Image (cartoon, rainbow, N blue to C red):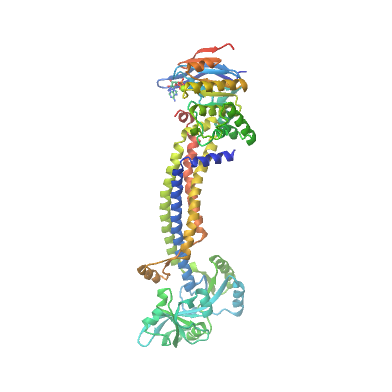
Amino acid sequence: MNWILIFKLAWRNLWRNKRRTLITAGSILFAVILALLMDSMNIGSHEQIISNSLRFGTGYLQIQDTAYFETPSLDFAFDLDKRQEEALNQLLRHHAYAVPRVESFVLAAGESETRGALVIGIIPELENRMNGFQNFLTEGKILNNDDQMVMVGSGLAQRLSLSLHDTLVVIGQGYQGMQAAGKYPIKGIISHPMEFLDNQLIYLPFEEASWLFVMDGKASHWLIMADTDKSALRVQQEIEKLLEGTELQVLHWKDLQPDLVKALAFDAVSGRIMQFILYVVIAFGIFGTVLTMTLERQKEFAILVSLGMKRHILALQCFIETILISILGVGAGIVLGFPVLFYFNRNPIPLGEGLSDLVKEYGMEPFLPFSLAPTVFIFQGITMLILTLIITTYPVWRSLTFPVLENLRR
Amino acid sequence: MPIIQTQQLFKIYNEDTIPVYALRDLSLDFEEGEFTTIVGPSGSGKTTLLNMIGGLDTPTRGDVFIDGTNIASLRKGDLIDFRLRNIGFVFQSYNLIPVLTALENVSLIMELQNLDPKSTRERALQVLEEVGLADKLHSKPSELSGGQQQRVAVARALASRPKFVLADEPTANLDSKAAMNLLDIMAKLNEEESMTFIFSTHDQRVIERARRVVTLVDGALHEDLVKAK
Ligand SMILES: Nc1ncnc2c1ncn2[C@@H]1O[C@H](COP(=O)(O)OP(=O)(O)O)[C@@H](O)[C@H]1O
Ligand SMILES: [Mg+2]
């Protein structure tokens, strides 16, 4: 088989009608860029939602008592013994770190008002490593480990009419039904990006929280932060081994937030449907071009076969022509689309006032984030390739079956 | 042994309704080196006969032997390959590949045969020289006159040294000067390369140049005239 000849014929045929080929490749190009933008925005916002919910919420993994997930009560708080803690640290080392937490709902009161609030016992340094909460400090200072003070969300402060250095009273239930009550000066106020947290958040140093809830150093759960989901999954397996035979279990964030996973999957599907519609429109455009390219050359096909070109070589030539158009369009789309995505990735589009409040309430930052994940590009490439392959069946089938004599007589 | 042999060849269209006899009991032999024309009025079966010999069409009855091979015995793909290796075609409307230059058109058959590029190029240059187009090597068909295109087509047909060249009314689209020029070239190649040519025509001046004239009427052999040298 003479590949040089086949490619030469295919390539030249492409440029027989320059305008038509350019328009077709151009439509693929725009579709790819559009699809890239849609996909990048979609995946970007998912990445952001997941990242936020991991950093401010569940962590990648959680070690908890097996009953805690069903009943998140302090009664299921636990201690890691020395051996377990060492093994854990040994295992995490580079890719991940563990953060003990005490979390419990309390009643928080100021001078005149009372509200439900969430106390989170934190190790400030680790908390900052995890979610950079220091950046949201608007007044006052960050907690130290041995402080007997609190940091509160600006929303909560406002609701309780409290300001910096005022005293906050918390009343709740401690370990095994014991009374938990404390009085703390406000050391700092943070403006938390997730509004529902900002309205109820009280940070205490871990030690102090453990004392408040009479837990004697126990944690309600441990968060594990990893650098990627992949390393988290690997770490999870190892921790599972470590916890074998104990009352403890390690859960992945997808187990911890099934609703989030479902919502994201639903959103992803609706995004894909939009893209599918876009691609179907484009596919018909390509098909139109390929159809005319095939039908207008029936006589030429007949001549080639009369002269002695085997039909499957002719089919291969047509196949290559179609694939080349698609590669031109997809290649140009990705080459031109990448800098556009890169720009928006670095300079996310800020949302307008109204929209911005709305997304804040859902715990998102008021920007349209764009993802540069390789899957965004790979997906468009593969989709286009599959569509093109489907389209090539027509010229391939035609060159394998067209009647030679009739077309020779044209 | 004749290079082409047809035995009781019939081609009947619409056999079940109103049959049209395009070929009627045609038994003909063609020898190597012939310069033969098939003549006859329009509709007499010239094209049909050439298509049968060229393996482009299948007879209703009868057989075609090329160099001893019954082409009906070949499978479809092998038949295409058989054409590629044995038969040169020249069509009435030139039918060059529009995206290829003269040189590339002439090289096409040899490239399909996977001959080595160097000898392909040498042979293509040689044949284009023989048809008087050494100065048009890199012209596309659209840049050539009808006469020039048909000379490229003749060059393409015989460049790969097939057993014979079939040409269905090769001069029909040419003015008489270009037609005579093409005939001269074909006659010269018949002499110099001892290439067998079988061509159809109804141009009297073309008929005069042939050494054998096979006349068809209504698909049947009317006359088979071999002129003395
Ligand atoms: N596909 C076909 N269907 C029906 N009749 C045909 C077909 N092809 C050719 N014929 C008939 O066969 C006869 C011979 O045609 P053809 O070989 O083209 O003659 P010529 O080339 O001598 O003009 C004509 O009567 C023509 O109408
Ligand atoms: Mg005819």
* Residue A123 visible in image: no
Residue at 58% x, 18% y: name it: B34
Q: Give coordinates of residue A109: x percent, y percent.
A: 39, 85
Total marks in image:
0
The one nearer the camera, A349 or A38, is: A349
- The residue at 48%/53% (across/down) is A333
Residue at 58 percent of width and 33 percent of height: B107
Residue placed most toward the observer, A163 or A68 = A163
Residue B228, above or below A16: above
Tell me the quadrant of the picture where the C terminus of chain A can be found: top left
- Residue positioned most to the front: B135
Q: Residue at x 55, y 37 (%)?
A: A313
The image quadrant of residue A364 is: bottom left
Can the viewer see residue A405? Answer: yes
Q: Is residue A241 above or below residue A386?
A: below
Tell me where residue B137 appears, x and y as whole percent.
56, 33
Query: How far across and how far down the image is residue B127, in percent?
Result: 59, 28
**Quadrant of residue A232 in the image?**
bottom right
The quadrant the N terminus of chain A occupies is top right
**Residue B81: image x %, image y %?**
58, 31
In the rendered image, which quarter is residue B228 located in? Answer: top right
